[in-house]
Amino acid sequence: MEFPFSKIKGGVGAPLGFVTSAISCGIKNPDATRLDLALIHSEVSCSSAGTFTTNRVKAAPVKLSQAHLRKGDLRCIIANSGNANACTGVAGIRDAKVMCAEVAKLLKLKTSEVGVCSTGVIGLPMPMSRIEPRIAELIEKLSPKNGSEVAAAIITSDTRAKEIAISVDIDGHRVRIGGCVKGAGMISPSMATMLCFITTDANLSSACLRKCTLECVEESFNRITIDGDMSTNDTVLVLANGKSGMPTIRRNSNACRIFRSALQYVMIELAKAVVRDGERVTKFVTVEVKGARTYLDAKKVAEAVSKSALVKASWNGGDPNWGRIIHAVGYSSARIREELVDIFINEKPSCLGGLQAPTPMDELRTIVAKPEFTVKIHLNQGEARYTMYTSDLSPEYIDFNRSEYAYWKQARKDGLV
């Protein structure tokens, strides 16, 4: 089928009726000049949807945004990088509320119409003395041209900003969808560890948008892993304001199916970008499981292989070690039969019927030496399938993650701890 979407520029600022801004507050370091506070605002009312971390330890912004969504729809998102505002107790909830209330007051919104997101170091109090006085400036800078600045302002250990925008025709109306995401470490399924903001000028009922969002998150962000860790701040928020001028999209309509397909594309592209930008990652690997008895069996196998430290370490070394893959298949708790398992690296068989395939090892090494390849696992027991996107695991990843608490030195200097 011909690809129905066109890529456009602008990120979250591309859809009509959305304005964005970003400034530098020095949240992690008062001497730093990088952007670290961002705002997304719809000039008209929105439908909204969100998904959040399933970690039982949830950051204050997650708790507050969830509460606001339960009250109704969001119209605005304020987000910061450099501090997660997680494990900060009552003070953290108060700080998140202050951020929402200040934005709401200046934009003449209800406080519950503002979502708040944070990412960064866990356990540190928020430096509100550097944030609260700058919110008015953040609002003054609102413009439809600052979408890329939002993408830059939310990154932490990422090496680059990650954004996308597309346009698509739905029932004769041009609709735009824009998105940005941050995430590079602490990435695992179950609402993967990242922040993602998506805007659209499509006109959707809240019920339709929430259903589409839940389904598309399951098919994208819940299918990526880098290191198997799940954070405290994971959030996806989607805002739809209807400024395209189209009639309301209803659930189960043809227009809904087209929109869902476009939203899925945006989320999958952003999810893949997270894996490609993983902390000290050198390989992007697609793991495809086919022939499982059930969807759950296929999922278990894909997750076991994608998360295996041994498998990921072998990929880092350019080693096409199918033995490590099949051992992960075996402990996945899926119902499998060893003598039926086939494993392919790209299209080259490395294991057939649970035994070494005749493909020369040098051919497999050549494939695994590449920055991207696909591992296909055929269980040959049914029709169910599941796909995940993962990476290798490098020695540099360990080195990179040994020194986060150097940030506490600045916090002590600021008098926060």
Image (tube, helix red, strand yellow):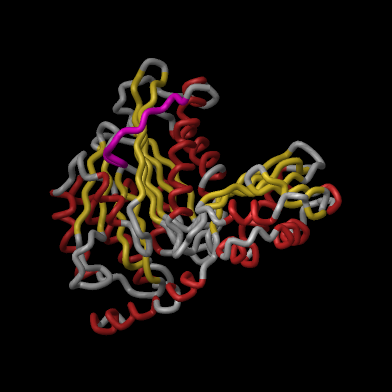
Asked if 345 appears above or below 327 in the picture, the reply is above
Q: Is residue 348 left or right of residue 114?
A: right
Q: Residue at x 22, y 64 (%)?
A: 131
Residue 156 location, quadrant: bottom left
Residue 369 location, quadrant: bottom right
| Residue 158 position in % (x across, y down) | 37, 60
Q: Is residue 347 magenta?
A: no
In the orientation shown, which residue stands out farthest toward the top? 172
**Residue in front for this viewpoint, 329 or 245:** 329
Q: Is residue 387 left or right of residue 120?
A: right
| Residue 305 position in % (x across, y down) | 66, 57
Asked if 329 appears above or below 202 in the picture, the reply is below
Q: Residue at x 30, y 60 (%)?
A: 80
Question: Is residue 89 at least partly visible in the picture?
Answer: no
Which contiguous range is marked in magenta? 3-13
**Residue in front for this viewpoint, 133 or 378:** 378
Q: Residue at x 26, y 38 (%)?
A: 18
| Residue 320 position in % (x across, y down) | 65, 58
